[in-house]
């Protein structure tokens, strides 16, 4: 795989040949031409070595056209004339990356080209990241994450959304189970409402009436008939959060409903058929609850037609920077104020395990935003976050935060390469990063 592509535009044949041979030996793909008018023939060029005096153009005046043709590319001006301040300033204003005067040392020129290539790669990676984030937001509501674990979740959501099968979402508290359920409903073909109910938050004696509704006089205070949530969600979806806390008596009635999707209001004698999709969620181990007799086995199988497991945040720490950016953007909309976060603060967050998952991260960023003047720093983070980071420092030889995060990132890359038998393209897909980014980091950490 080449380091990148270079186009040399120079009317001196010897210069073109020497540069082409040297740069190809250093891993670049090189194209050459002696006239500026030929530039439109070339595609996907990263670096353009542009001579100032060409038979058909002035190099400095042509920089902006080059940038238009190659929006990610960087232009390096080369000339045989002494470098003067006026022409250098004009070249930089027109968008040149640097300005070299012949004769130049090849090693020095290579250093300039490598630096320009890093800038090109950064621009491309930022664009890839922006495109991916936008596609996630457009297709998956506010679900954010580029990790391999979240990509698997997105794929499962896409596969199950178009069906009517019951879905069980498993995951710790705060991982975003309701957001996952909303996303399933949003990209499905259902035209009815999405209605959520927390089975743990409603008293047992009220949960049945909330779900199935009641007729006038069904109980004291029932002065008029009321639809239940299952009926309200006809042609839509009902999200039963914390299904493991549903009373065992009500589980039997829910099972009967799932058999034919017919319900009867409390105090009524008529049944009504509804078209509703059930999406349930739990942070408990329902298999263990079944063994302990706390959850009906037949209901468990009815609800778990398709199971989606949401990973805890500690298993996808590479998503933390994206999540922080997303949370800050929401705060900015609310407060009409710009917020940023320092690299030290972000790295401290990467060292914390987040038992409360994304919900806890959201609370931490909101709290830190209040304590900051617009810049969330290490000092504005809650005490338990900084103490956790300090504890991590004391457990290793290096007390440098960059070293610690670098070791964490290096281990992730090594694990990915091991799982993909050293195939870098597959490792990049596994990590959810571009191939260029992975190649840069392999070189950075001297990974063999």
Image: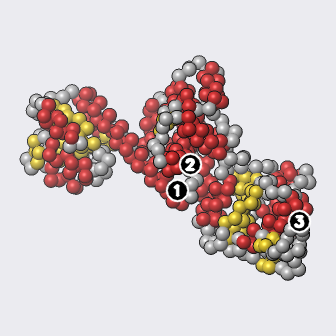
* Image location (x, y in percent) of residue 405: 54, 30
Disc on res. 252: 3
Q: Dot 1: few (<14), some (14–19), or many (≥20) neighbours within 10 Å?
A: some
The answer to whether mark 2 and mark 1 are in CB contact below 8 A is no
Q: Quadrant of residue 258?
A: bottom right
Q: How is the image coloured?
A: secondary structure
Q: Which mark is residue 145?
A: 2
Query: Left or right of 437: which side holds 47?
Result: left
Q: CA distance from mark 2 to mark 1?
A: 10 Å
Does residue 21 appear left or right of residue 358 in this picture? left
Q: Which residue occupies 76% across, 49% down?
A: 283
Q: Residue at x 68, y 74 (%)?
A: 235
Element type at mark 3: helix
Q: Are marks 3 and 2 in contact (CB under 8 Å)?
A: no
- CA gap between label 3 and label 2 equals 38 Å
Q: SS of the residue at dot 1?
A: helix
Q: Is residue 16 visible?
A: no
Which of these two is toward me, 7 or 91?
Answer: 91
Number of callouts: 3
**Residue bearing mark 1:** 137
């Amino acid at each position: 795989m080449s380091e990148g592509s270079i186009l040399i535009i120079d009317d001196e044949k010897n210069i073109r040949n020497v540069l082409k041979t040297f740069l190809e030996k250093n891993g670049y793909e090189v194209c050459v031409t002696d006239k500026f008018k030929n530039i439109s023939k070339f595609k996907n060029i990263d670096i353009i070595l542009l001579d100032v005096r060409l038979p058909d153009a002035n190099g400095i005046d042509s920089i902006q056209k080059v940038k238009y043709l190659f929006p990610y590319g960087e232009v390096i001006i080369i000339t045989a004339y002494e470098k003067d301040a006026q022409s250098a300033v004009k070249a930089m204003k027109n968008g040149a990356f640097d300005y070299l005067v012949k004769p130049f040392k090849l090693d020095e020129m290579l250093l300039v080209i490598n630096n320009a290539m890093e800038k090109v790669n950064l621009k491309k990676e930022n664009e890839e990241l922006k495109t991916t984030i936008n596609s996630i937001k457009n297709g998956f509501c506010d679900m954010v994450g580029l990790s391999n674990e979240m990509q698997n979740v997105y794929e499962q959501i896409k596969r199950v959304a178009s069906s009517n099968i019951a879905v069980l979402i498993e995951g710790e508290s705060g991982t975003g189970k309701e957001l996952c359920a909303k996303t399933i409903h949003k990209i499905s073909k259902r035209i009815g409402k999405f209605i959520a109910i927390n089975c743990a938050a409603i008293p047992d004696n009220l949960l049945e009436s909330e779900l199935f509704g009641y007729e006038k006089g069904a109980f004291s205070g029932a002065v008029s008939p009321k639809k239940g949530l299952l009926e309200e969600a006809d042609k839509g979806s009902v999200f039963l959060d914390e299904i493991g806390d549903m009373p065992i008596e009500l589980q039997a009635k829910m099972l009967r409903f799932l058999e034919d999707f017919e319900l009867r209001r409390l105090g009524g004698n008529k049944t009504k058929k509804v078209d509703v999709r059930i999406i349930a969620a739990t942070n408990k181990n329902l298999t263990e609850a079944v063994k302990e007799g706390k959850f009906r086995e037949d209901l468990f199988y009815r609800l778990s037609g398709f199971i989606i497991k949401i990973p805890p945040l500690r298993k996808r720490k590479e998503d933390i920077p994206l999540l922080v950016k997303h949370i800050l953007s929401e705060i900015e909309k609310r407060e009409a104020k710009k917020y940023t976060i320092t690299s030290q603060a972000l790295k401290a967050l990467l060292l914390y395990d987040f038992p409360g998952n994304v919900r806890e991260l959201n609370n931490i960023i909101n709290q830190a935003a209040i304590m900051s003047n617009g810049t969330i720093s290490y000092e504005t983070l809650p005490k338990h976050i900084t103490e956790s980071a300090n504890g991590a420092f004391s457990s290793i030889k290096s007390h440098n935060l960059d070293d610690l995060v670098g070791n964490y990132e290096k281990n992730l890359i090594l694990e990915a390469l091991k799982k993909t038998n050293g195939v870098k393209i597959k490792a990049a897909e596994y990590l959810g990063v571009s191939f260029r980014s992975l190649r840069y980091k392999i070189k950075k950490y001297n990974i063999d």
